[in-house]
Amino acid sequence: MNQKKPPVTLEIKHVCQDTKARYGILHTPHGDVETPIFMPVGTLASVKFISPEELYDINAGIILANTYHLWLRPTEKIVDNAGGLHQFMNYKRPILTDSGGFQVFSLSENRKISEEGVTFKNHLNGDSLFLSPEKSIQIQNSLQADIIMSFDECPPYPATYDYMKDSVERTLRWAKRGQEAHQKADTQSLFGIVQGGEFEDLRKYSAESLVKMDFDGYSIGGTSVGETKETMYKMIDYCIDYLPFNKPRYLMGVGSVDAILEGVVRGVDMFDCVLPTRIARHGTLMSSTGRINIRNQQYENDFRPIDDKCDCYTCKNYSRAYLRHLIRCNEGLGMRLLSIHNLRFLIKLMEDIRKAILNDEFKAFKDDYFARFNLNSVDSRGF
RNA sequence: GGAGGGGUAGCGAAGUGGUCAAACGCGGUUGACUGUAAAUCAAUUCCUUAGGGUUCGGUGGUUCAAAUCCACUUCCCUCCA
């Protein structure tokens, strides 16, 4: 067994008294971050509309980039030539790359799965492209993020048990192949991805099998693909206790406030989601009183900030009426200001969550949140 | 003064006898968005007590039936004098 310390390790500092919520420090080659953490998504080596300086200002830690998309443009070779993603995009803090497994789901119209890997039809020019677990890891080695992900199949929902079983087993074989192909285990930590859909035994099997392979961290995948909140929480419950206590647990693609709270209470350390940035570009804001569609007529003459409890640059300087105007006029500044707000809102939420965990008040913190929005934990829309 | 072209829903613009409350685009309103093919997508946009009612510059005709044909009228544009 490899006795060497992995490049990325989680130091659990405190576990909440009456929940499974954990506070920890994630050590990475590009510095430490506190967990639970929300990680903004910057697929094409850019958190859309947001500069690295703005990310530092809102106290972002880890950000994501995407293997599939960077493979197509500008190609991993060019990122490698630049000295890796950190140099290329001028981000000094930790970076995580997703493997392309989500594109197996999101680009499902244009791909074919085989045991060997996935053949994609390039959405840009129609070329046939082949992504294997080895190729995904090789690309991620060139991209040089701190954390890299196993190439998996993010399966559709719903899927039959038989389909899911085959998929889980294939994804496990792919995880093994990727692990064996990983050339930079001394500088990049590889995470395995638990699959199994809504099936308890498959989730357990997937988690236990991955743990035997000994990854530096584990993520729960196949979530936020159309299932109900209730189902998603079950997906977590079915596998999380099989994951090692002292390694990072990452719930993929989750970024609504309610789901984050439900993840944390179950012992999840890391979250990522395009939701805050995407809905920002489309005019929706997250706030301490729920979601706000800033394009609505009611904000035409509303010169208050989005959220007077928010400490972000946008809330400190701009009114709802002005932001409404910018978004309606399709101004880039509007998308940028709303993105800053939504990201800061979630990052601040995580700061508050960590504080609550450290104070052994997380359960009350979570209950208060749900009570405030008069929602139960499985409302589909969330907040 | 002469010749020609044109006025269609908030705007632009199709339509040139029935299947037209009228394509399409913009604008307006409302939703959605969860490991980003997403500055995207969807619904709705004459009035309505939902059965209907009133529209295609105006008025009057032809016709079973008119935004569409005819007459007059009004306004706009181009060219000639």
Image (spheres, rainbow, N blue to C red):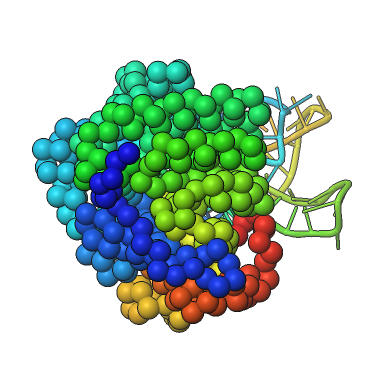
Q: Nearer the viewer, residue B3 or B48?
A: B48
Q: Kindly identify the residue that appears in the image at 53 percent across and 30 percent down.
A: A168
Give the vertical position of A156 relative to B47 (above or below): above
User: Where is residue A80 shown, x and y percent of the image?
Assistant: 15, 38
Give the vertical position of A38 relative to A57 (above or below): above
Q: Is residue A316 left or right of residue A92?
A: right
Q: Nearer the viewer, residue B40 or A99?
A: A99
Task: Answer with the quarter of the image where residue A177 lies.
Answer: top left
Q: Nearer the viewer, residue B73 or A316?
A: A316
Q: Kindly identify the residue that appears in the image at 22 percent across and 33 percent down.
A: A183
Residue A157 can be seen in this image:
no
Give the vertical position of A138 relative to A254 (above or below): above
Residue A351 can be seen in this image:
yes
User: Where is residue B70 shown, x and y percent of the image?
Assistant: 62, 31
Q: Kindly identify the residue that appears in the image at 49 percent across and 79 percent down.
A: A359
Q: Kindly identify the residue that appears in the image at 32 percent across and 74 percent down.
A: A313
